[in-house]
Image: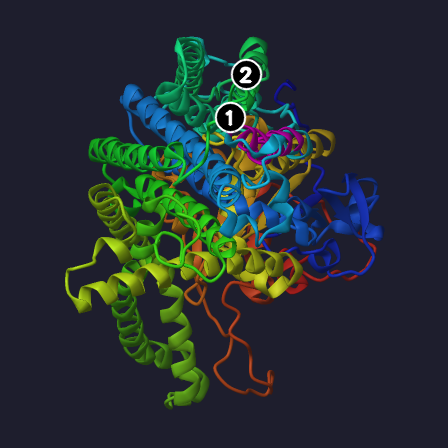
Amino acid sequence: MAPAPQVSRSTGIALELLVHGVGGTTPQEMLGDPRTVRVTGDLTAAMYRRPEDLDAEEHPERYRDQPVAEAYCWSNLTSGNGSRALWLLLLPFMVVNLAHWMRPAAKGRTRAVRFYGVLVRVLALSLTVLLTAAACEVALDLVAWQCAGVSACSDRRSWLGFLSAEQGGWWSQPGRRLALAAVLPTALVTLLWYLSNRTWSAYESQRPFLGTDSRGDSRGGPDGDLGGGDPDGDTPEPKAPAPDDTPDATPAARPALGRPGFWYGRRLVARLRAAHTAAGLLTVAVFVERAAADYDWAHSGPGPVLLGRLLTTALALCALLVLAVVCRRGRSERRLDHRLDGAVITFLPSAALVLLALSLVHAAWSRPGWSSSGVLVAGEDTFRALTVGQGFLVVALAAVALSLHRRAPDARTSLYGLGGPAIAMLACALGGVMTGGLAQRVADWLDGPGTPGMGAGSAIGGPPVLLSWQASVLPVLLLVLLVPVGVLLVRTSRLARRTEPVVAAEYAPEYGGRTPERGRTRQIARVRATARLTDEASWIIGLVAGSTLLLGAVALAGSWAGGQVPGRAMDGTGPFVESAAEAAQSTGSWMVGFGFILFVASGRRAYRDASARRTIGILWDVGTYWPRAAHPFAPPCYAERAVPDLASRMSAWTARTGGRLVISGHSQGSVLAASAVWQLPAATRRRVALLTYGSPVERLYGRWFPAYFGPAALRGLHGSVHCWRNLWRATDPIGGPVRVDEGPGRPEVDRGPLKDPLVHGRTAELPLPEPILGHGDYQADPVFARERAALLAELGPVLPRQGDGAGHPSAEDQGSSGRSSG
């Protein structure tokens, strides 16, 4: 670890480090110059400058009135070719990983915080089992067990001929068909393991070297287990010598985002990867072994029955070991958690693979009288157990989150602290829709003109009854949501009308007190009202999560009570109810299937089309900003590369030059900038100013992730950094004020709302209509240059002017030295 750098008195040179937001911004766009040179970094993420600025540190006299612009481009960490859209198939894993970070802030509740982390990790494990079970349902149940066992289905699929029971070949026995079909879900689990291991090396293996204070503090709980972040672990930083030209600062508490191990959790990810891989392999083994054991119990002698019991016991013990590994350890953030638990990482997947191989051999053993009929019992039981388990876990998570929030309530926290449980419920719902949609579509395809599960005209039994019930409640859920969506639209329309007089009053001076043009006023008011929809998202998400939990319970009860699909279960209840049930079943089946296809297609478009990426990119980048603390198969965390990059650059540059540095972040870039500043040693932070604009730091992160971006954390950041300005607009749907309480003698952090558009109508200076900028192009506002200049002035003295008579524009007139909008 590098010690806190001892910097010399500032020579006056200043650096503006630009960090873009989402949207794949290029260095040329950020610096406003088609010619850029990579200063440090690689093709994935790097720092860039204009060619004429490469030797700026050797010629500080050229930069008396303007900072040197340097752009950090990290867009290749989150964007790329169309194949990146395949990550969207892992969206449930990413969403449940978000739930881990959404716990309410709490002091003195270490056990509750750890229990919260355990519940989320177990819920994440259930999603891995759900995905694997869906693959088993398609390959083992629908294809190998049902379709290959019925001539009416296998005769229509020539590629199933060698598996068909009618052919009487070696593969025609059900156990051998299951053993062969198990290759598909096994390959899926192996692929997930490979991707998790590969993306760790590509994205998250950058070890920070700035994470500890000068003591190298690595204190933590027993065995370093902080359970997702020790809520009582904020410790004062040691007082570092202040530079000669900066005032001494009171040491501030170091929050979780400033701890050395926050952005490097290799040990936890490796353990979870081993556990989830083992869980997936065990799921495949259970599907195969359960079918063979059921047949042996009814038709075979004591030897095969005993072997089946031994295998079942071994599978259960290995599953318990997997669960214990997942529950045992959380994140260790006070130190770089680079140690690996070799025994666990090697033993768990290997043991599960051996048990899977034994189960396949046991099932493939010759059983001449065995024939497949109906559906695999393991499929129905697995999906029911997962649904019940996930429901109980979500309810328990909600109880823990509510108790944490009541201990330290904050009015700005979303859903009264229930944001994490709500998001976890949505992760389960997404997993159910995606797996159910896949199973429904494959069943419809195999069955041809029939409807699986409906009896007459159907060649196969179809997927588990529970999946049909879950699909059937989807249209009901959409109908329920029409009411709040309508209410939201009405409220937005009313807010726009109430905002029109306010907008007219703001722009009245342009018209000499006359009333501004009403159409333009209405447009501005409508944009402002629409931007407020972001603040209304929490109760919509809460309503969706609550309705999903309730309807999921109804679907579970319906499938358990009748044992038939909704269209058959409602026979005899009356024509209206019967037709409604059949309509809900067919509509829901097609909706989940169409939604799955639309989801993948939209993901590919998002990575090919920049405009589409800007629309959904913020949601994706919020999800992949957080480390993989709950689910190792979630998409990789780009911040584990970006934050160490920024912190290293700031520390190295200030130590080498003694100059002033403004890190300037837009949108998601402002979150990366704040995270990097938290990682800096105290002495370096006092040489750094923070400029954020269009920032979701409080509006999104502070409300949904209060333990990490809540009021206490933002106040600590404000107190530890030399100075901070935040620019925001009322027309911005993403950025907003950071709402930090300024102490006595400290300048205000928030500057806003900025005027948008700059002028209402046509003027002599601006004869063409000005656009409403919203979330983009903050540098176009003159306030940006003034605030940047003010930050540089607060950092320290500038280089004295030399009497060469050369005229240099002031910082206020200079404008932005670069563009970092994304």
| Closer to the camera in the image, 253 or 719 | 253
The residue type indicated by label 2 comes to: Leu
| Closer to the camera in the image, 131 or 530 | 131
- Horizontal side of 333 relative to 357 (left or right) equals left
In x, y percent, where is residue 539? 27, 54
Q: Is residue 741 visible?
A: no
The residue type indicated by label 1 comes to: Pro
Q: Which residues are magenta?
A: 175-198
In the picture of the structure, the residue carrying the numbered disc 1 is 368
Do labels 2 and 1 touch, CB within 8 Å? no
In x, y percent, where is residue 430? 41, 48
Mark before the other along the chain sequence, 2 or 1: 2
| Closer to the camera in the image, 661 or 663 | 663
Is the residue 243 above or below the residue 358 in the image? Answer: below
In x, y percent, where is residue 328? 40, 15
| Closer to the camera in the image, 105 or 443 | 443
Foreground mark, 2 or 1, reads 1
Secondary element at tag 2:
helix
In x, y percent, where is residue 504? 36, 81
Residue 760: mark in rendering: none
Residue 424 quadrant:
top left
Residue at horizontal 46%, vertical 70%? 755
In the picture of the structure, the residue carrying the numbered disc 2 is 358
Q: What is the distance, in whole Å, between disc 2 and disc 1 at their CAs?
A: 20 Å
Mark 2: few/some/many CA within 10 Å (<14, 14-19, 20+) = some
Q: Is residue 814 visible?
A: yes
